[in-house]
Image (cartoon, grey):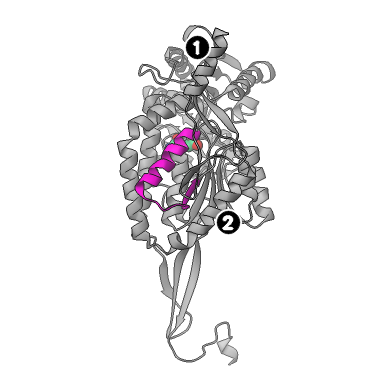
Amino acid sequence: RKKNERAAARRTAVKTYYNYIGGEWVRPAAGEFFENINPADTRDVVGRFPLSTAEDIARAVEAAADAFDRWRRTPAPRRAELLFRLGEILVRNKERFAAEMTREMGKVLKETGGDVQEAIDCTYFAAGEGRRLHGFTTPSELPDKFAMCVRQPVGICGLITPWNFPMAIPSWKLMPALICGNTVVLKPAEDTPLSAINLVKACEEAGIPPGVVNVVTGYGETVGAALTEHAGVRLISFTGSTETGRIVASKCAERNAICSLEMGGKNVIIVMDDADLDLAIEGAVWGAFGTSGQRCTASSRLVVHKKVYKRFSQMLIERARALRVGNGADPETEMGPVINADAVAKIMGYIEIGQREDGAKLACGGKRLTNGEYAHGYFIEPTVFVDVAPQMRIAQEEIFGPVTAVIPTDSLEEAIEIANGVRYGLSASIYTQDVNRAFHAMNEIYTGIFYINAPTIGAEVHLPFGGTKATGNGHREAGTQVLDIFSEWKAVYVDYSGRLQRAQIDTAKM
Ligand code: UN1
C-alpha cells in the first residue's frame, strides 16, 4: 500500500501541460494525457501532456486560419521585431530550457545548450530577413512594361518535428514560416513535447499574436496524420524517418499540399592516408557518438585508407571505450542515453545483425548498460564495427544510435563510390591534407552537405540544410533558401504604355 501511495504522490506532483490554440492554453478535446519520461531514469516523469486527437488539430487549424490575414498584412519588419524579442527571451531562458531538454531527451547539457543556441541563431537569422525578404525585378519583353517578383506567404503551415533537436528543429521551421507571414500548427515529437511548449511559451511572451503559433501534442499516427490530412493546411514541413516521410508526402500529394521533407542519412567520413589522424579520430568520435549517434547527420560510416586503417581503428576503439556514458545532467558525462525503449530495441537489433547476419567484427561496445547508475535508463555502449563491407546492412541502413562502421579502402575513387553507394545523401566528409583530393571528393560525392577536415555533423543555420536521394524531396531548410519553402512567388507585370501590348505574338509574322 505504501508503494501505491508513493506512486500516487509522485503522479500528483507531476506537472500537467496543455495545448496552445488561439492564444490559450487548453485541455485536449478528449481530455486524455500521456506521460513523458526521462530516458536516463524512467522513474522520473517529466510531465503529463495532451494526448490530442483530430478534434484538437481542427481547432488549431481554425485558430491559425483566423489569425492569418492579420499576420500576413503585418509588415515583415514588424514581424521581425517580435522575433528579435523572442530571441532575447530564448537567450534569457537558455540554461533552464537546456536542463529541461536534457531531462526529457537525454543528450548532455553542453549539447542541449547548443540546441537552444541553434534555435536562437535561427530566430535572429529569420528576424534579419524581415528587412530583406528580397524579390527581384527583371526586364520585360515589351517596351514600357515592368516585370518583378514578390514573395507571398503560403498560408497555414503544419510543422512535424522530431525529438533529437527538440528546440532547434521546430525553430528551423517556425522562424522562417513566421517571417514569411504564415501561421502555424506545430506537432512536436511525443518524446519531447516540453521543449516545444517552452518555445511556444516564449513566442507568447514575445507578443506574437494569438493563433499565429499553435502547438498540439500527441502521437504521430493520430495528430500528425490529422494535421497532414487537414484540407486547411497548405504546407507540411516534416523532419523524421524516411518511412514516415513517404506517407506524409503521399498524403500531401493527394490534396495538392506543399510538402518539405528532411529524413534519414548514412553519412560517411573518408580518412585518407595523408590525413591528420588525431584530428580525424576526434572528428569521428564526435560525429559518431555525439547526441548518442541520434542525428540524421551522424558519422555512421568511416571509410579509411588501408595504409592508416589499423592505427585509425585502434585509436578509435580506445577512444570509444573511454567515453563516459551516463546521465546527461552530470557535467562529466560525454554520452547520454538513447531516447526510448523502441530505440534500444532497434539499435540492439542492428548490433545483432552486424554480428550474425553481416558477419562484421564487433570491435568494442555492443551491449546495453543495465547495472548501477544505468539500471533505470536507456543506455547503450559506444559501439564500433570494423572490417565492414560497404554492402552490409549496418553500412547501408540508418541505425540512429551510437554505432559506427569502419570500412577499409584502397583508393579515393573507391571511397567515393562507397560514399555514394547508399540510398541517402545528407552529409559527407573527408580528412586529407591534399586540397586536390578534398575538392575532387566534394565534387563527386552526391550529398547536400560536405565537410573538409571536420565530421559530418554541425551544420550552421545560415547555410542551406538538406540532402539528396532518400534524404529529402529537393527542398533546403535553413539559409535564405528556406524562404522558398515558406513563401510562394508572385510574378507582377506593370504595363505603363497606356495601350494593349500583346505578349506571345510572333512579331516576325506581324
Ligand atoms: C538532425 O540530426 O536532424 O548539422 C539535425 C547538425 C545539426 C543539425 C542536425 N546542426 O548536426
Q: Residues in magenta?
A: 193-214
Residue at 58% across / 56% down in the picture? 234
Pinpoint residue 198: horizontal percent, then vertical percent: 42, 37
Nearest the viewer among 350 and 11 is 11
Q: Name the residue under label 1.
A: 374
Query: Which residue matches tag 2?
Result: 234
Residue shown at 58% from the left, 85% from the top: 505
Tell whether 261 sits left or right of 247: left
Image location (x, y in percent) of residue 386? 55, 18
- The x, y position of residue 232, in whole percent, is 60, 56
Q: Is residue 334 above or below residue 58?
A: above
Amino acid under label 2?
A: Arg
Label 2 sits on a secondary structure element that is loop
Q: Which residue is drawn at 40% across and 17% down?
A: 333
Going by the image, does 425 lie left or right of 54? Answer: left
**How many circles with numbers are drawn on the protein?**
2
Question: How far separated are the C-alphas under marks 1 and 2?
Answer: 45 Å
The disc, 1 or 2, on the residue closer to the chain's N-terminal end is 2
Q: Report which quarter residue 329 is drawn in.
A: top left
Secondary element under disc 1, as helix, strand or loop, is: helix
- Work out whether residue 319 or residue 239 is closer to the camera in this orientation and state it: 239
Q: Which amino acid does label 1 sit on?
A: Tyr
In the foreground, 151 or 50: 50
Residue 203 magenta-highlighted: yes
Position of 505 relative to 465 (above/below):
below
For the C terminus, the image quarter is: bottom right
